[in-house]
Amino acid sequence: MRYFLITVLSFFFSTILFASSNEAGLLSETNIANSKNIALKFTEQELTWIKENPQVTLIGDPAWFPFEGFDKSKRYVGIVAEVLNLITRKSGLIFNVSETATWQHTIQFSTEQPVDIISASRANLILNKNYRPTYSTIKNPIVMIARGDMHYIPDLNSVKNLSIAVISDTGYSHIIRQTYPNVTFIKVDSINDALLGVANEQYDIVLMSMSVASYQMAELGLYELRIVGITDLDMELTLFVNRDKPILWDIINKVKLHETKQERHEILAKWIKHKYIDRYSPEKMRVLMLVTIFFIGFVFYRNHLLKKQAKVLTELAQTDKLTNIHNRLYLDKILLQTTAQSLRYKKTFSLIMIDIDYFKVVNDKYGHLVGDEMLVQFSLLITDNVRNSDVIGRWGGEEFLIICPETNLQEASILAEKLREQVQQTIFLNIGRKTASFGVCEYQASESVELCLGRADKALFVAKRAGRNQVKAEG
């Protein structure tokens, strides 16, 4: 029965992910949605900058669909192009897009002749040196692509002896190698080479973002390929802004904060519906739907409602209602688990405790509703800038806690300083700039959870007493 269930799941992945017209199944939104339709207002400094710099330069990847690329008429199109059109309508900025021959040329051009904006994976190490990422636009899972005769793969380490390809020079390729140190990867220059290599049995598996894989498989007619597994990693699409243009960074982030869910859904639906669905004939779609419905009804119907209810109850019990990040109950559980693993495997971890400076002033001056909105923005900002392995949650009030597995004091302090700078440079809606204080400590062998938390809290107190807006570490 277990083997049968795995087979069904494998088929379910390959049919549903290509046949569904629901954009949430392929792309998920990560930036703040302006569901309350708050009016967009620019500062005098920002309006002056827009007036003096009406055109913004941008490098476009020639073929990174559905995110961006150039059609036969050399028009810049894709999800990123739609996002830029939205920014133009709301700010008046005009984007002057130039095409490069390859992504490698784009990277080279960004270092030799810096432009204003480049769209790429948030994890791109080269771009992060000279460019600053804005709020992420899209979060897309990294998936495993193989031929149709391969079964569902629950974990990449279980098939590490197979030939596994990864696209070189992608922003997330180094994260893949770090996450799977025991897997030997084959570097491939382009997306098409990787997919055709799997189709021609040159490679067994290739890793890439789900939406790119789905689009290119349809473009190349590689219907014998399918998704056989999903990793725990994500490709986060973002706009990188030249670090010499901080006001431009503020303008773009402000527009992003004022995007509505309707605007975002229209952008995603436009590309997903036309690029993922229309390439299948009506007859094939009907067959896929019938087969999918049969397997879903046969395997999942009996347990569907119970599992759904259990998932909702678990999320409610572990999630902070306001900020939608982990709550203190969940953090307490993870702390106990992390401490037990540290004692058993002799691995260290660190804690970062954060407190928003003078948050009471926000509530007193603007009211608790504005204060609540700031807490939501703050939690998204911190979540957007920590690592996938870190666990972040609301500790209480305006305090937050980050649990950093396999991280020493120095590494945690570097992360805390990065977060402090991000907070200091961010403009919060209706409030403006705020700062935060950080207390850091590394777990010491055999100490209790309470003692470790106490040392982090003590470091935070020292940071606040020393003038706030700084990081202090407790040795």
Image (cartoon, helix red, strand yellow):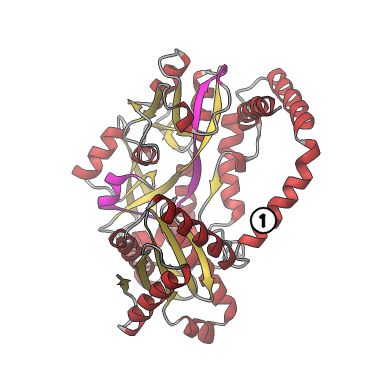
Q: Quadrant of residue 52?
A: bottom left
Q: Is residue 281 magenta?
A: no
Q: Position of residue 464 (x, y in %)?
A: 36, 81
Residue shown at 39% from the left, 26% from the top: 165
Residue shown at 62% from the left, 30% from the top: 13
Lateral position of residue 185 relative to residue 284, left or right: left
From the viewer's perspective, is residue 80 above or below residue 91?
Answer: above
In depth, the one of 290 and 158 nearer the eye is 158
Q: Quadrant of the N terminus?
A: top right
Q: Is residue 434 visible?
A: no
Q: Amino acid at mark 1?
A: Thr
Lateral position of residue 112 relative to residue 96, left or right: left
Q: Which residues are magenta?
A: 124-150
Q: Quadrant of the C terminus?
A: bottom left
Label 1: which secondary element: helix
Residue shown at 58% from the left, 57% from the top: 260
Within 10 Å of disc 1 (Cα), the crowding (few <14, some 14-19, many 20+) is few
Q: Position of residue 108 (x, y in %)?
A: 23, 38
Q: Position of residue 235 (x, y in %)?
A: 45, 42
Q: Is residue 276 visible?
A: yes
